[in-house]
Amino acid sequence: MSKPIRLELGRFDVRDVIFSDSTRYRDGTLHIDRAELQQHLSKDSPFKTIEIDIAKPGEETRIVHALDVVEPRTKVSGPGCVFPGILGPPTQVGEGRTHRLAGVAVVGAADPFLGEDHWFAREAIIDMSGPGADYTPFSRTFNIVLTFVPDTEASSRRTKDEKANYMVDARTRDAQASIDATRVLSLRTAEYLARAVRDLEPDRIDTYELSPVDQALPKIVYVHHNIGAALYGSARHPQDHAMLLHPNELMDGVLVIATRWVQAALRDCTYFHQNNSIVRDLYSRHGSELNFLGVIFCSGMGMALEDKERDSDSVVKIARMLGADGAVIAPLRPGHGGVTLMMVCEKCEKSGIKTAIGVSQLNTGREEPGLNYWVPEADAMVMPGDDEHLLQLPAMKKAIGGSRILNTDIEALGPIEVDLRKLYGATAPMGPSRLGGRLH
């Protein structure tokens, strides 16, 4: 019999974060040597400077222009490293022991880079207090904010290059390289911080294993719709075939955000992949209410109908071979991927597999139609919130990441009026949203 895939996740509950003379963890406080961290990040950094700040829950602080958000984790034992394919070889992970700093997040931030077409989705705001804090989960974490300041004089001397991304954002190669560097440096920071607890005894150890359970329990798969994440360091995964992942792989950081164009409220940042709420809930019910079979990973972004047929068929084939009775499909968004997942829903239901769909915000304005494709079988759908809701946010004493709200002349300190889509993670289907629904 093969050896089971088992991951021990050691949790350290961080109650405060301060700058200090050395990086260490003691009695619930994470001490950070800012100079040492800056030196650590300076290797191969294309930026003029990287400013490092701490934003704590309850402070009158506003973070703007946020990019990725990452939870600090490090491997203690088992194959590979955290964020494989980026911080190390793309070795399969998800077993052994990993330590995490619970309650801490690394937040990258930057003004748009030269050559970056910063349309409306680029802005992402995290308020640490006030009414905006009620909507973003990162108002409740201790945030180590990295503000990436480019060498604008050197950048201005570079010749303009062709656009590297033909989809929504238009970026030169230099701009894309800068964005990629923010991602790598944010991950390096997260791993550096977690190393402070690598050899310590955790406050709690949670063990994750898809152990054998009563076969009479309903067998459930999670169909994960990938939008803009790199898998094991590569964003060039096949668009027309699904693949099976162990849920433990997500906890070790195999999915890392690779694009920033999704609006902030529903942006699938790396933190949400590490702490996927759907995986967490399915694991919590494994053996008592259901039999969690695993994660089916798919993109569904092929543009031709033939691509969508192949992709949806491959998802349903895996689910049927696993013997699934039900499938949780999320996050569904309008566009090519949304069409493919609706086809997945239809084919699952016709194969006897019941489905439930987690739907992101259906449009970006009142004049848009919402779903661009729907099937009658999609009769169990959940949406995490309306990101058109307007909020009045008060003035803050400190702003990190930039001095003005993007595409406006409004000072970041505020006060500002903003719609919910600009608040980081407010309606993210995989995130710990504080929004709920009522049955009328």
Image (cartoon, rainbow, N blue to C red):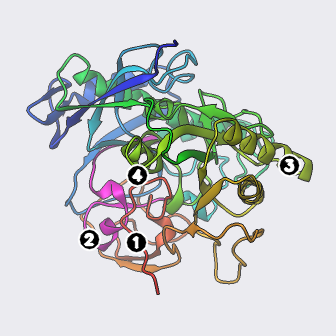
- Looking at the rendering, the stretch of residues picked out in magenta corresponds to 124-148
Residue that numbered label 3 is attached to: 309
| Label 4: how many Cα within 10 Å (few below 14, some 14–19, many 20+) | many
Q: Nearer the viewer, residue 48 or 74?
A: 74
Task: Please report the residue visible at 53 percent of the width from the left and 54 percent of the height from the top.
Answer: 267
Q: Counting residues from the N terminus, which is met first, the one under dot 4 or under dot 1?
A: 4
Residue that numbered label 4 is attached to: 401
Task: Please report the residue visible at 70 percent of the width from the left and 64 percent of the height from the top.
Answer: 334
Disc 1 residue type (three-letter)? Gly
5 vs 313: above or below: above
- Circle 3: element type: helix
Please, which residue is most extreme toward the left here?
27
Q: CA distance from mark 3 to mark 1?
A: 34 Å
Q: CA distance from mark 4 to mark 2?
A: 19 Å
Does the residue at mark 4 contact the one at mark 2 (Cβ under 8 Å)? no
Residue that numbered label 1 is attached to: 436
- Circle 1: element type: loop
- Circle 4: element type: loop
Q: Counting residues from the N terminus, which is met first, the one under dot 3 or under dot 1?
A: 3
Image coords of residue 240 (percent x, y): 81, 40
- Labels 2, 3: front one: 3
Task: Please report the residue visible at 40 percent of the width from the left and 71 percent of the height from the top.
Answer: 436
What label does residue 351 carry, if any? Answer: none
Q: Counting residues from the N terminus, which is met first, the one under dot 2 or under dot 3?
A: 2
Q: Quadrant of residue 60?
A: bottom left
Residue that numbered label 2 is attached to: 130
| Label 2: how many Cα within 10 Å (few below 14, some 14–19, many 20+) | some
- Labels 3, 1: front one: 3
Q: Quadrant of residue 415?
A: bottom left
